[in-house]
Amino acid sequence: MVSGAWWAEPRRRCMSADTLVRDIGTAYGERFGFSMPDRSVLRTEKGLTEATVREISEAKQEPEWMLRFRLRALDLFNLLPMPSWGADLSELRFDEMTYYAKPTEGSSQNWDELPEEIKDTYERLGIPEAERKFLAGVGAQYDSEMVYHHIREDLEKKGVLFSDVETAVREHPEIVKRFFGTIIPPDDNKFAALNSAVWSGGSFVYVPPGVHVEIPLQAYFRVNSQSFGQFERTLIIADEGSFVHYIEGCTAPVFSKDSLHSAVVEIVALANARIRYSTVQNWSSNMYNLVTKRAFAYENAVMEWVDGNIGSKVTMKYPAIFLMGPGARGEVLSIAFAGKGQEQDTGAKVLHFASNTSSVVTSKSISKDGGTASYRGLVKVEAGLTGIKSKVECDALILDPHSKSNTYPVMDIRSENASMEHEARVSKISEEQLFYLMSRGLTEEEAAVMIVHGFIDPLVKELPMEYAVELNRLIELEMEGSVG
Amino acid sequence: MTATLTKATPQRGSLAEAPEFLWTFKAPSGSNRDEGELTHITIPFRGDSGRLQGGAIHLEDHARARVFLQYKPQDPSPGRSYGAMDGETELFRTSLEIHLGPYAQLELFVLSSLPATLTREALDHCTLEEGSRLIWTDVGFDAGKGTYERNIMFTGKESELDFAGAYGAVCDTEGTYILTTRHRGPRTKSRVYLKSALKDSAHLIFKGLIHIEESAAGSDAYLSNRNLVLNDGVRAESLPQLKIETDDVVCSHGSTTGGPREEELFYLTSRGLHTDSAKSLLVEAHLSAVLDRLPEESREEVERRAFDLLGIHEGGACS
Amino acid sequence: MEGVPMKGLQIRGLTARIDEKIIINGLDLTVEDGQIHALMGPNGHGKSTLANILMGHPRYTVQEGAITLDDADLMTLDVSQRARRGLFLAFQYPAEIPGLTVAKFLKRVADLRRDPPKNAAAFLGELKENLKFLEIDPSFVNRYLNDGFSGGEKKRMEILQLLTIRPRFAIFDETDSGLDVDALKVVSAGINRMRGEGFSALLITHYRRLLDLVRPDRVHILERGHIVASGGFELVELLEQDGYDGIRRLVGGTKEAVYER
């Protein structure tokens, strides 16, 4: 499925996370026709007020309707309560955060400030020097023009729109207005409201009817804007009969001084379309990663979420699929790795609103060194539907006596002609499996690593090769010293 | 006031008044009932709406007992049909405390089939000490709203629970069944099977939490919830939960909700049965695994009433 | 290891238990290099236990005795170390490892050999040959290790590992059980292929069939945790005719050896 220069440049599948640093765009803007508004505001003041929101909107030169959308969301943010369930968010301080920073060229990050573990992981993963600095937000930007240029041309020929959301708001308001904020309305939850008020960056993808986008699209292709923005907002629309695979994230650890990443991803798969959205998240250990992701799948459409959570201090993320039309299908494949000091609170939500729809959720988690991995899921089948099939499977591995695993599924079925199955298992690495592999000469640690690799293989298989290889290496690193 | 016993056996178990409880069943250390010796305890609604009626079952170490508990309405008139009368209901609140001493074993049967005029609130606590075993068969066909919360705490090592529940809900019954097993002692074991059948516009919620604490290494817990949905418009909610705080465990749960299976219906109707009869048969098969555990003398009657209730009636039986 | 006399496997005075129960009691057994011995005996008397203890299964505790392979003491070694010394166990019920493909696994263990395949191509060449020899469909290698395999497929997989790893000493724990005639032929061919200098084996079985195809040099009967009789193939014939009673009559009853603590 992948082709061209992208494949030949494996190391460039990832752009840095740091929100303080990057704007690759200015030079590219001139060359490829993006414009980057130049504003005098560099950084808004701490805290979130109406003034902040107005400044952000002005800095982006937004139309009136978007400003109104933001302001209404701000009101909702102030009204809505914090979630009463889930991970511990007591340390978040909304009034001490900065909600907008203009991306600037050049580095404002100091290599020496970077935490040791991150530098160490780059070393172990074999990431080349130049790329390390790039990822850490220290070095100069990557020269990925040639690769990017090729892909852009190809997409344009097909009529595929791929840009940052700001550009889409200006250049394709009809499409944006039709879908923006409709899949995840600002009043959905407090963090969706927050994002709706201060969103900045994120991808906009529109695939015309019948078009199949062969290569996976990634944030870094939109080199004119920060790709791992704190409050990025992504909107992906696959028109009838089209196909696209979008990849978000990076396996290499991504460092940001900001402690909150609160993104919103809205996806629409119109009739007979298929969308796959893959994420590999490896935020640094100071990050709160609270994301609202939802897809609407219409008649005979297929939506697939592939969700890998390795990093962050706390992640709360439950990719959701609303099956809106008959024949629609949803699949969620989720992996979480909770290490020391981490809480991965992830899962999936599938709501069946039409007949003859089906869903499959596979969740795998690994907890070690006192980490906590929780699965939270919902499968809901409305009344009066027929031909519904749903299967949820959760498997959790706990690698030592101090780590924890929780499973909190909810099944709510109101139709007779529905078949819903759910299974969950929690255990440690089986003694018999260890013994078997050790009896073939592998040490206990090697055997454990092999078993864990096998455990996550179903998800890793679904990722493009680079990610798969990196993810496997990452797991090996995480597993070191975890046995014996 | 003493609870009604159909078989009073003052020597081997004693019924005593306890300050907070209306009745207590005690089995002294080492006491062992002969096979088939079953103590019947009836818990009627006393008309005191909202007042908590308590009861307790205490088995001392190495004691064994078989107890059949039945909740009854105050005035069990056979003429009353299901469905609230004038919308008035009374609140029937009970609490049951079960304590099993080391190596004690209790075979408990609980049966409840109350009319819709009663709203139920049950809160039961069980403590299982070292090596003890609780085999509980729970049959619930209450017509009204009800919340049934059971907490089982495995304090001693190697204690075990074998719980099987059969629940039927018709008309506009609303039942919430909460079962929490809390494993504290090492190498403790629990098996929970919850089976239900829903009809008309009934609504059942099953919350089953398996909580394994850090001290419970070597524990083995399993919960399964299977809900048979008989028509559109019912609502079956299943919330099996796992809260695991240590690695050396084997825990799993499974939940299935759905209507009668196509292949099974096809097979039965291909043998000449009408669809409705076939469905009824499938309901029977579904709940039989649990109802078969009931003592012989009560089984037939319970099954008859249950299947009558869940059978597909002409013209509907909800008033 | 050059110059060291290849003595094979030697077990002396082995007594071992699981929890409080003694299963192996005063067992002596020697299998010289280049030989294949059969171990038979009634169920529940310790045959599988012995296999697992030799491999170092953590559940069992060895109270007394010595186990050596080519004069090297195995007792101080853990499971993987014993394997790397050349010990191999073909399991009766091989564990399943979902997610781990056969190919990936075999490559890993082949690389642990003292003479590992020079490169990927060499490994694949070996693998192809072994698959052909064992009449295993090549698509097998993409399946997850033992996951969803039938009994016969699992046993063939064990033999495939045998040929990939090329151990010094192999124990076959009822490898013949549940196999049809064709599968049995293939499995026997695999074992016979390893036969020769630098390899010895212990076949644990109940039935004669395997032993007709892989002729043992010596036969031992294990009962009540120790060896009650050793001899030639005639023991197999006696067993077939008169069962274990026949053996007992021959030996004159077994000593009251097993006791529980």
Image: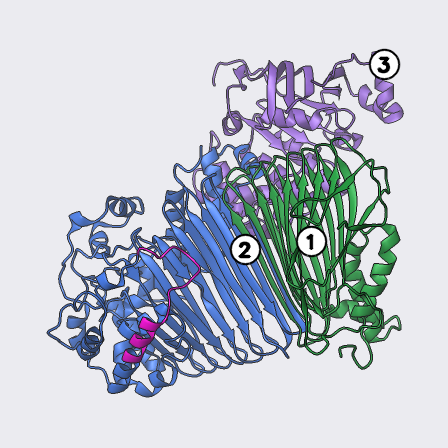
Chain colours: A blue, B green, C purple
Q: Is residue A168 above or below residue A253?
A: below
Q: What's the chain of the residue with tag 3?
A: C
For the magenta stretch, what is the residue range? A71-91
Q: Residue at x 78, y 65 (%)?
A: B283
Label disc, if present, on residue A394 of the rendered structure: 2
| Type of amino acid at the residue the image marks with label 2 | Cys
Task: Give x and y (percent) for residue A389.
Answer: 62, 69
Q: Is residue B182 left or right of residue A254?
A: right
List x then y, in percent, for residue A300.
54, 78
Residue A238's quadrant in the figure?
Answer: bottom left
Q: Residue at x 66, y 41 (%)?
A: B99
Task: Please name which of the two marks, 2 or 3, marks the residue nearer to the observer.
Answer: 2
Real-space CA distance between mark 2 and mark 3, rounded to the nearest whole angstrom: 58 Å
C30 to A175, vertically: above or below: above
Q: Which residue is mark 3?
A: C250
Pick the front one: B87 or B286: B87
| Residue positioned most to the left | A40
Nearer to us in this view, A315 or A165: A315
The answer to the question of whether label 2 and label 3 lie on touching residues, with beta carbons closer than 8 A, is no
Q: Amino acid at mark 3?
A: Leu
Three-letter amino acid code of the residue under disc 1:
Tyr
Element class at badge 2: strand
Circle 1 sits on which residue? Answer: B193
Element marked by disc 1: strand
Q: Is residue A374 magenta?
A: no
User: In this rendering, does residue C217 appear at all?
Assistant: yes
Q: Between marks 1 and 2, how big is the CA–CA gap?
A: 19 Å
Q: Is residue A460 above or below residue A31?
A: above
Q: Nearer the viewer, residue A360 or B236?
A: B236
Residue A466 visible in the displayed image: no
